[in-house]
Amino acid sequence: MRRRRRWAAAALIAAVIVIGLWSPLWAPLWRASVVVLDVYSSAIYGANYAASITPEPRRTEEHMTLVDEDVRVTWWIPGAGTRHAAMLVVNGATPFGNDDPETARVSEALARAGYLVMLPQFAFLTDARLERSAPLKVDAAFAAMLRRPDVDPERAGAFGFSVGGGVLFAAAGITGGALARAKYLGALGAFFDIRSYLASVVSGTQLRGGRLERWTPDPEARLKLPLGAAEALGDAADRETVTAAIRASGGPLDPSAPAGLGDEARALWRALSATTYADAIAALDALPGGLRDTYATLSPATRWADIKAPVYWLHDEGDRFEPVSEAESASGAPHEGGTTLHLTRLLSHAAALSQGARQEDAAFWIRELSGLLGFALSVLRRAG
């Protein structure tokens, strides 16, 4: 089995080298091949085969203020050239922030392929909070990236991981925002609507093709998403009561809310303690205006029709953090730029490899890697 995987990797390396010889004509394919080779040679063998055929990128750090938040920003700058196509990368809800190895791996791969990468570390993501100002902060980061003299604003886009992908799409719908200038938007795993995402997590079901089916969220998602939802409560005492109960249970709540909670917290408790998808949706729709508006602001579905850039959405078919139904709902919703959805079995949510993928045969690897190469080519062709 290992020999088959090595054969598949060797074939990919050979293809990258051949394409590289023709890079003046096939530049987007060359760049996409470098990204896939970098990520998967590192993930499979712990050795970056792309490093031997690409200039070493430069990594720098700085802090900047984005909508009143002091944000650590990591830059990956290509090792060749003076003016670059650029990509804003938005992390998932990882406590490691910009030190998350999966995000760093992809960011370096993009820089090796010739893209200047900006990675801001937002507290709402490291703390896993549903924060109403989050889309504004993401949009401000994109605006800051465009101001760099070594960035070509006509070749700039953005890509988000997991929850960060959902917030990115929400930011792209802001009227008059900087992301209206993006040439493309992409995500690896993301959500489309906070309502349906929360309903899937608390009920253990997802709505696909008009029918409910079982879906088992990862324990981390079962805990973090309800916590994030509760962090949006306006009353500090209620917020502490609800989040403490969620942490104590690992996510599920008893139907009986504690005495003394305010109306907003009691309404959210009903939603988070629901056991069916329909009951959760009904309770979320009945939330008081302020909380309901916060969730709507964070949901790409609210302004999806206003997104003008093409959207490229990559999703793990067996994703246990964000159900694939979120991606399918987005791909069926119209907007000017259109949506390209690619489902894969090679990934594990936002990680490069699922455990089961390592046991698959060469045909699986060739099929999945070629699919990812095609997806990367579609995105990077738009990137210029």
Image (cartoon, rainbow, N blue to C red):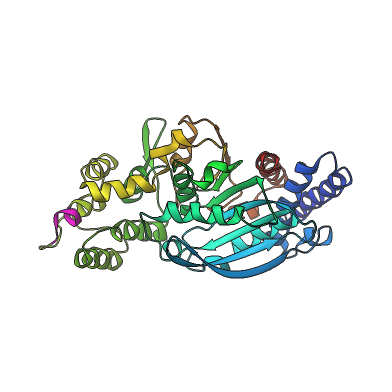
Instruction: Place residue 112 in its image quadrant.
Output: bottom right
Of 220 and 165, nearer the camera is 165
Work out which quarter of the rendered image holds the C terminus and state it: top right
User: What residue is at 75 percent from the left and 42 percent from the top?
Assistant: 28
Of 2 and 322, nearer the camera is 322
Question: Does 151 sit left or right of 303 as displayed?
Answer: right
Q: Is residue 149 visible?
A: yes
Instruction: Place residue 23 in its image quadrant.
Output: top right
Of 191 and 183, nearer the camera is 183
User: What residue is at 27 percent from the left and 47 percent from the top?
Assistant: 292
Q: Is residue 350 visible?
A: no
For the record, the magenta segment spans 261-266
Work out which quarter of the rendered image holds the N terminus and state it: bottom right
Q: Is residue 96 above or below residue 82?
A: below
Instruction: Name the outermost residue toward the left.
Output: 259
Residue 220 at x, y = what percent? 41, 61
Q: How many marks?
A: 0
Instruction: Place residue 53 in its image quadrant.
Output: bottom right
Residue 84 at x, y = what percent? 72, 52
Instruction: Name the outermost residue toward the right.
Output: 21
Q: Is residue 37 magenta?
A: no
User: What residue is at 50 percent from the left and 57 percent from the top?
Assistant: 92
Question: Does 12 sit left or right of 248 as displayed?
Answer: right
Residue 66 at x, y = what percent? 48, 61
Q: Is residue 70 above or below residue 21?
A: below
Residue 280 at x, y = what percent? 26, 45
Dominant secondary structure, magenta: helix
